[in-house]
Image (cartoon, rainbow, N blue to C red):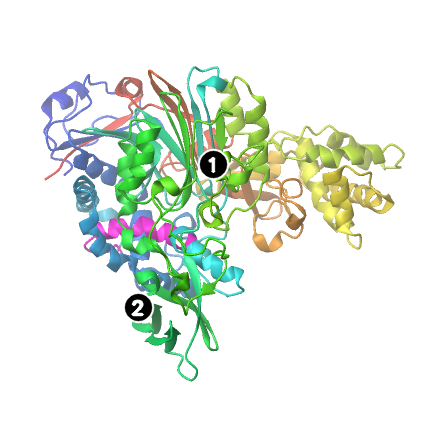
């Protein structure tokens, strides 16, 4: 443990002895970055990203844990409590910064704990430890040791509520706890909801945002000017940076970079292959509607034989309050614990997911993916376990690309049943008949089109025509109900990818940070025609002239972009009392607007100009003056991109009043996807969107990558890496180079810590 490292050769090369042996500007440059046996070196580049070097893999995980704890200690420890269901017992609301815990009430932390106890992930993870690949188990043991080493070395930084005795089972459960209610079980919960059942989940309580917004695309060498494939991964989420940690690791035969959920290195690339992921998957879980025995709600008939619900008492300790005790109920549908998620009279609903039997799968498959040397081996890695349900997209140095609609998917007895809604839970007629092999999933390899994308669209909308690989697949292998149609981000990606015959590096960056609001010209064109004879005041005419110069891009420096957003919002109000589907005829079918719609367009213009005139800078106000990306301690900077939605640029589903008319044109999101919340009267600050990005350029000789992690890698508000990426990258639509190999990193090392693993 620090500071007992004794690699004298490396220390001499660095000109120091122990501890933090170099600081910014000194740029240590040893010829060999690897320390001695039992030792770990953590180099930091100019963005604070840790580059971990160790002779063996498990020691690399030791160093990764130590680095993560130094940057995100409270965040990591909170994830352990969340997986154990002990948040309310130890942490009171407001005790942690908003960007770590969010604005949870006591009642909400209790509900989070209840969900953790209901699904029993931590206790099931204890059994899953035995299913870990031997090297994965050693890696996770190294990670536990790294966390404990940091806690021992920095007792002054250990919060009083830190969980005791962190174990490997905690490391299995913690990442799954973040994903379970959205994906592995959440897919079944949504099936219940589609049947009208009211169900709440922990995911809804810990984040006020939908989880279905992400981008990814890949281009083959035949369509690039770079000589190799190009891959973008852009999984959206909270702009506060929760849940992920950027790293580079070289340990034994393990050479990888990416974003980690604790020790689960699930999103990254190595020296040969890289991958991305977005929400969208097969249907991996089901909701069963059960009729209970008349007069005895504790039992239900199954194939004519009465069965009893299994009860479990859950006691939740609450800090400074009396504990709460509730009774949870379960069935054994499909031979897995299936909790009751709702009751109504003589009916109960349970959710069944096969992931219970494979909790170790994410850990095993993550390592297997990181060890792959081609997209074919990447696909084979799916057999090492099961990735949580996602669209997987990979590329390699050979120029091949691969798409997998991934997930541990049950074989249903009748593919014609609507498995996206509750099904009969009183009969074995709906019982699963095993698990599909990986080959059964939707798999697309190096298509003739030369590109692939899935920005949260149904597989049939991945290109201008449905991929032939979808033909003959049962519906439940193609959709889990999250994504059933097209969206603006998918359509925009197809438009650009299909029209770009030779993508350059500049083209790739431009597409990654694209801010075009799809369909903008469908609104501006009829307005332009209607204003020819309109009598407007000078201020409104000035507003209109600038609006008509709008080029469709929601760029920070644009005044026309902000006017467009104001006008679109006012248009909704001015259309009150008019059949809104008349507007759809204009926008989607190109029909000329009737008098009522045209008058509404002009009235919206007048209202928007009046509202904008009251804001700072008046009609000269720019998009980035109002829409911002936030940092620590209330700092913020101009932002580009966004979503056209009711109520400004909110991303709250209960305010999507118009989106049923068509998300592609009426509620489009830019590819550089950002949604905002109000901060006071004058600003909207990004709260969900493109927060971790990686753009890879492949060639036979290697891979060059650029990345972004908003707002920065450190949770410490006093660290210069707390929000440096928000200011210098996100706000400016840039990425930083990933200095993957030592020769790339060597001139840019700003500090190094040497550790000795006992």
Q: Whole-percent x and y of residue 743?
A: 27, 17
Point out the frontmost of discs 1 and 2. 1
Q: Quadrant of the N terminus?
A: top left
- Classify residue 682 as left or right of residue 452: right
The dominant secondary structure in magenta is: helix
The answer to which quarter of the image holds residue 587 is top right
Look at the image and tell me whether residue 264 can be seen: no
Look at the image and tell me whether residue 248 can be seen: yes
Q: Which callout, 1 or 2, points at the residue further toward the start of the chain?
A: 2
Q: Which numbered marker is on residue 147?
A: none
Q: Are marks 1 and 2 in contact (CB under 8 Å)?
A: no
Q: Is residue 642 depicted above or below 185 in this figure?
A: above
The local secondary structure at tag 1 comes to: helix
Q: Whole-percent x and y of residue 116?
A: 34, 60
Residue drawn at x 44%, y 19% is 221
* Magenta region: 160-182
| Disc 1 from disc 2: Cα separation | 51 Å
Q: Whole-percent x and y of residue 499?
A: 59, 23
Q: Which residue is mark 1?
A: 469
Q: Which residue is mark 2?
A: 317
Does 174 appear in magenta? yes
The local secondary structure at tag 2 comes to: loop
> Which is nearer the eye, 305 or 286?
305
Q: Quadrant of the C terminus?
A: top left
Residue drawn at x 33%, y 30% is 376
Most extreme residue toward the bottom is: 295
The answer to which quarter of the image holds residue 106 is bottom left
- Classify residue 487 as left or right of residue 283: right
The answer to which quarter of the image holds residue 526 is top right
Residue drawn at x 48%, y 58% is 191
């Amino acid at each position: 443990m620090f500071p007992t490292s004794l690699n004298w050769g490396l220390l001499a090369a660095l000109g120091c002895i122990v501890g933090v042996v170099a600081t910014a500007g000194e740029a240590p440059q040893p010829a060999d970055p690897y320390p001695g046996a039992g030792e770990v070196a953590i180099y930091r580049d100019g963005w604070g990203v840790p580059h971990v070097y160790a002779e063996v893999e498990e020691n690399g995980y030791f160093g990764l844990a130590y680095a993560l704890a130094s940057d995100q200690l409270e965040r990591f420890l909170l994830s352990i409590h969340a997986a154990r269901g002990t948040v309310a017992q130890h942490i009171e609301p407001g005790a942690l910064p908003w960007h770590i815990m969010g604005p949870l009430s006591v009642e909400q932390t209790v509900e989070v704990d209840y969900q953790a106890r209901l699904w029993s992930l931590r206790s099931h993870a204890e059994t899953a430890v035995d299913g870990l690949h031997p090297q994965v188990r050693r890696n996770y043991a190294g990670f536990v040791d790294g966390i404990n080493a940091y806690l021992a070395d920095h007792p002054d930084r250990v919060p009083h509520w830190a969980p005791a005795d962190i174990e490997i089972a905690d490391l299995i459960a913690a990442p799954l706890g973040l994903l379970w209610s959205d994906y592995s079980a959440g897919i079944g919960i949504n099936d219940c909801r589609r049947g009208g059942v009211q169900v709440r989940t922990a995911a809804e309580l810990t984040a006020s945002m939908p989880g279905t917004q992400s981008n990814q695309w890949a281009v083959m060498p035949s369509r690039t000017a770079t000589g190799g494939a190009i891959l973008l991964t852009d999984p959206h989420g909270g702009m506060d940076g929760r849940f992920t940690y950027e790293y580079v690791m070289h340990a034994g035969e393990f050479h990888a970079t990416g974003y980690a959920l604790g020790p689960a290195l699930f999103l990254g690339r190595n020296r040969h292959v890289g991958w991305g992921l977005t929400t969208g998957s097969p249907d991996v879980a089901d909701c069963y509607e059960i009729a209970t025995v008349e007069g005895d709600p504790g039992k239900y008939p199954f194939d004519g034989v009465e069965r009893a619900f299994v009860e479990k008492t859950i006691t939740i300790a609450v800090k400074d309050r009396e504990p709460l005790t509730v009774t949870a109920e379960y069935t054994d549908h499909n031979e897995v614990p299936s909790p009751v998620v709702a009751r109504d009279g003589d009916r109960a609903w349970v959710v069944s997911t096969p992931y219970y039997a494979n909790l170790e799968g994410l850990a095993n498959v993550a390592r297997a993916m990181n060890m792959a040397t081609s997209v074919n081996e990447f696909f084979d890695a799916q057999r090492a376990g099961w990735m949580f349900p996602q669209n997987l997209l990979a590329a390699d140095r050979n120029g091949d690309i691969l798409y997998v609609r991934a997930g541990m998917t049950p074989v249903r007895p009748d593919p014609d049943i609507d498995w996206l809604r509750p099904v009969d839970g009183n009969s074995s007629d709906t019982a699963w008949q095993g698990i599909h092999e990986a080959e059964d999933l939707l798999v697309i390899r190096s298509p003739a089109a030369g590109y692939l994308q899935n920005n949260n669209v149904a597989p049939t909308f991945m290109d201008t025509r449905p991929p032939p690989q979808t033909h003959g697949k049962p519906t439940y292998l193609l959709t889990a109900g999250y994504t059933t149609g097209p969206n603006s981000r998918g359509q925009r990606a197809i438009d650009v990818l299909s029209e770009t015959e030779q993508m350059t590096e500049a083209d790739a960056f431009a597409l990654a940070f694209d801010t075009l609001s799809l369909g903008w010209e469908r609104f501006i064109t009829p307005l332009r025609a209607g204003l020819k004879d309109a009598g407007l005041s000078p201020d409104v005419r000035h507003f209109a002239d600038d609006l008509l110069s709008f080029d469709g891009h929601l760029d920070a420096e644009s005044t026309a972009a902000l006017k467009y957003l104001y006008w679109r919002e006012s248009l909704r109000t001015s259309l009150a009392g008019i059949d809104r589907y008349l507007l759809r005829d204009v926008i989607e079918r190109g029909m000329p607007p009737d008098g009522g719609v045209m008058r509404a367009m002009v009235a919206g213009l007048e209202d928007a100009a009046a509202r904008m005139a009251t804001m700072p800078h008046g009609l000269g106000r720019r998009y980035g003056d109002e829409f911002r990306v936030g940092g620590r301690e209330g700092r913020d900077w101009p932002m580009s991109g966004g979503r056209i939605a009711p109520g400004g640029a909110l991303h709250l589903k209960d305010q999507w009043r118009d989106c049923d008319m068509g998300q592609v044109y009426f509620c489009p999101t830019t590819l550089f996807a950002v949604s905002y919340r109000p901060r006071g009267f004058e600003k909207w600050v990004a709260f969900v969107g493109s927060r971790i990005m990686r753009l890879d350029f492949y060639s036979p000789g290697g891979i060059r990558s650029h990345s972004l992690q908003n707002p920065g890698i450190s949770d410490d508000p006093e660290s210069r890496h707390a929000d440096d990426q928000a200011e210098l990258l996100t706000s400016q639509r840039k990425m930083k180079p990933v200095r993957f190999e030592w020769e790339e990193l060597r001139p840019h090392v700003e500090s190094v810590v040497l550790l000795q693993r006992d």
